[in-house]
Image: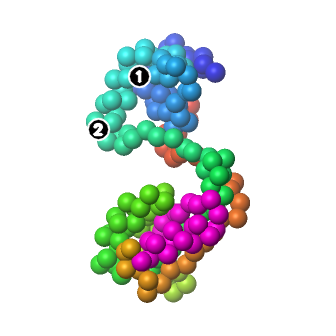
Amino acid sequence: MPLAVNPSLNHAQKLLILRRRLETGLPLCPRPYRALAVECGLTEQQVLEATSEWQANGLIKRMGLVVRHRTLGYRANAMVVWDIPDEKVAAVGHALAEEPFVTLCYQRPRQRPDWPYNLFCMIHGTDREQVREQLRQLRERHGLENTDHDVLFSRKAYRQCGGRYVGDANA
């Protein structure tokens, strides 16, 4: 639904509205950039130029989809947490991130003595058995058979969305 953009907003303010709007995804229509332009008080060309510039400057790394994996039949997912030696965590993290069934892979600080894990990866599958099999493959392929880890299967999804980085323009 198009927003009523205040005509007194300057170009920078309209671009901030565009950035916030992009965080919620592209409109599902034949001309999404034109629809964004109307919502933000810009021209389609201005939207295309701004998004191209943001990508060139690294503000936007990529534009993608948030897939509702349960709707597609992926009913099981697990966060696998690993205790990787600090000198190997970057190499292992990059290797796991290349696996097709790993959707997230992050290094995080350990919280000793209670939490020794420093590498986290999310694995999705149609059921828990498939996730366990993918984990077995990961461990074997990357020499992690003797690496301490834990598997945290999700129980309930409360929210799934892309990141939100632009605050309220009215604040």
119, above or below 169, in the image: below
The magenta segment is 119-140
Secondary structure beneath dot 1 equals helix
User: Amino acid under label 1?
Assistant: Val
Looking at the image, which residue is at 52% across and 30% down?
A: 26
Q: Horizontal and vertical percent for residue 113?
A: 51, 86
Q: Is residue 142 visible?
A: yes
Left or right: where does residue 160 sit relative to residue 82?
A: right
From mark 1 to mark 2, how far is it between C-alphas? 15 Å
Tell me the number on the disc at residue 57.
Answer: 2
Which colour scheme appears in the figure?
rainbow
Secondary structure beneath dot 2 equals loop
Please give the residue where the numbered disc 1 appears in the rendered image.
47
Quadrant containing the C terminus in the rendered view: top right
85, above or below 125, in the image: below
Looking at the image, which residue is at 49% across and 19% down?
A: 31
User: Amino acid under label 2?
Assistant: Asn
- Which of the two discs, 1 and 2, labels the residue nearer the N terminus? 1
Q: Horizontal and vertical percent for residue 52?
A: 33, 29
Looking at the image, which residue is at 65% across and 52% down?
A: 73
Q: Horizontal and vertical percent for residue 132?
A: 57, 72
Left or right: where does residue 107 sit relative to residue 171?
A: left
Q: Horizontal and vertical percent for residue 102?
A: 47, 61
